[in-house]
Image: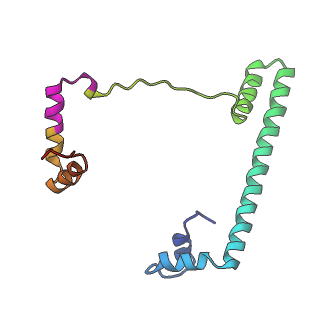
Amino acid sequence: MKDFNIKEAYIRAGYAAKHADKNAYKVSNKPKIQVRVKEIMDARQETNELSMRKVITSLLRLGEKAEEEGNFGNALRAWELLGKYLGMFTDKTEATVKMSHETMTSAELDAELTRKLGILKPEIIAAFTEGTKTEGTA
């Protein structure tokens, strides 16, 4: 499976693109197709798990060997990568965002709102303001 797009897979299999959406959906719901897709997904999962195991095992071995040889820089890097994999460390970024409207005066806010509403079509504005009117207002 190249990707998870049934329409594109249907076309790659040699079928016409004209009604690929509808036909690919029908084909993908056939029991034989669903079984085959599951087999492929299971094999892919197994391959991924083997690759992860190999990487983890290698990092453990390299970290231990580096420590034994006194190469603490390499040992630290191996342990760091293992720790990241295990979710022991999270990089946090703190951001402060100041909204421009917080520094605007009432007059500036009114002018900006008027400018932005001018971009909208009148029927959109009417539909929006109908829901915000209260009884007794025009």
**104 to 27, vertically: above or below:** above
- Quadrant (top left, top right, bottom left, bottom right) of the N terminus: bottom right
Is residue 108 on the magenta stretch? Answer: yes
- Identify the residue at image location x=17%, y=56%: 123
**67 to 137, vertically: above or below:** above
Quadrant position of residue 57 = top right
Residue nearest the observer in this picture, 75 or 108: 108
Residue nearest the observer in this picture, 134 or 45: 134
Residue nearest the observer in this picture, 110 or 62: 110
Residues drawn in magenta: 102-113
Q: Residue furthest front?
A: 136
- Number of numbered discs visible in the structure rendering: 0
Quadrant position of residue 60 = top right
- Identify the residue at image location x=52%, y=72%: 7
Is residue 104 on the magenta stretch? Answer: yes
Q: How is this picture coloured?
A: rainbow
Q: Position of residue 14 (x, y in %)?
A: 54, 80
* Side of 24 where 116 appears, left or right: left
Q: Position of residue 23 (x, y in %)?
A: 52, 80
- Identify the residue at image location x=28%, y=24%: 102
Q: Position of residue 86 (x, y in %)?
A: 73, 34
Q: Position of residue 78 (x, y in %)?
A: 75, 29
* Secondary structure character of the magenta stretch overall: helix
* Side of 7 where 42 appears, left or right: right
- Identify the residue at image location x=14%, y=39%: 114
**122 to 74, vertically: above or below:** below
